[in-house]
Image: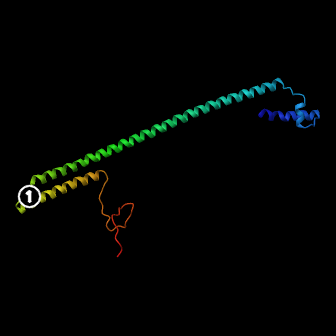
């Protein structure tokens, strides 16, 4: 297109010199124009330059496609790596929490074994029964303390919402009372 636009003014100038006022449809019937060697060399150089530029651009497109494919693969690998890391972290946290809860379970087993050992049915003295009951109470308190410490290590803390306005984002409704 560039060549046609450059040649058009030359053609019109030649037609004006010849005094040709005929329409463009008669141009095809007119005598073909001859180009000089310099014009042919210029055209060949322009075509050669454009071919080089096309090849350069094709190479750039190829490089950009390769970079894009590499980046997409890298992004995919990063996502897979983070998912795997999240899963392993989750499993580790759960196993650590479960291991800490085993201490509570062991304490409960010990308390149960102690109660069976006492044989409450055979205790005849009220003071001895009180003593055993206080020991059981003390064991339950210690187990509760171990459980609380375990939960605190994992960010679970107890708080009392008494007196606060009900917030469904923080509180769980157990039942409703009709207004008096």
Q: Residue 164, how many percent across, how many down?
A: 35, 67
123 is higher (above) or lower (below) than 41 = below
Q: Quadrant of residue 137?
A: bottom left
Front position in the image: 19 or 113: 113
Q: Residue at x 57, y 34 (%)?
A: 65
Give residue 89's quadrant in the image.
top left
- Residue 95 placement (x, y as % from top left): 29, 44
Outermost residue, top side: 37
Mark 1 nearby-residue class (10 Å; few <14, some 14–19, many ≥20): few
Q: Is residue 83 above or below residue 29?
A: below
Position of 53 with respect to 65 (left or right) is right
Q: Where, quadrant-wise, is the N terminus in this rendering? A: top right
Quarter of the image that includes the C terminus: bottom left
Residue 118 drawn at (x, y percent): 9, 54
Disc 1 on helix, strand or loop?
helix
Residue at 34% x, 70% y: name it.
177
Can you name the residue that lies furthest to the front here?
121
Instruction: Residue 4: name its quadrant.
Output: top right
Lateral position of residue 69 relative to residue 146, left or right: right
Which of the two residues, 2 or 135, is positioned nearer the viewer here? 135
Counting from the top left corner in percent of width and height, residue 143 is at 20, 54
Residue in the image at 55% along x and 32% along y: 66
Q: Residue furthest bottom?
A: 180
List the residue tagged with mark 1.
121
| Relative vertical location of residue 122 with respect to residue 38 in this rendering, above or below | below
Q: Is residue 9 left or right of residue 120?
A: right
């Amino acid at each position: 297109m560039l060549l046609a636009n450059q040649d058009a003014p030359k053609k019109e100038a030649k037609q004006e010199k010849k005094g040709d006022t005929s329409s463009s449809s008669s141009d095809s019937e007119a005598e073909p124009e001859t180009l000089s060697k310099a014009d042919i060399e210029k055209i060949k150089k322009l075509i050669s330059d454009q071919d080089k530029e096309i090849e350069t651009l094709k190479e750039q497109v190829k490089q950009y496609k390769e970079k894009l494919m590499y980046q997409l693969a890298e992004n995919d690998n990063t996502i897979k790596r983070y998912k795997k890391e999240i899963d392993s972290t989750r499993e580790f946290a759960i196993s650590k929490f479960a291991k800490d809860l085993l201490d509570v379970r062991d304490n409960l087993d010990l308390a149960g074994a102690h109660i069976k050992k006492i044989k409450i049915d055979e205790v005849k003295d009220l003071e001895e029964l009180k003593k055993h009951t206080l020991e059981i109470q003390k064991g339950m308190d210690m187990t509760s303390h171990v459980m609380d410490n375990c939960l605190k290590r994992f960010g679970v803390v107890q708080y009392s919402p008494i007196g606060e306005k009900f917030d469904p984002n923080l509180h769980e409704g157990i039942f409703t009372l009709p207004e008096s």
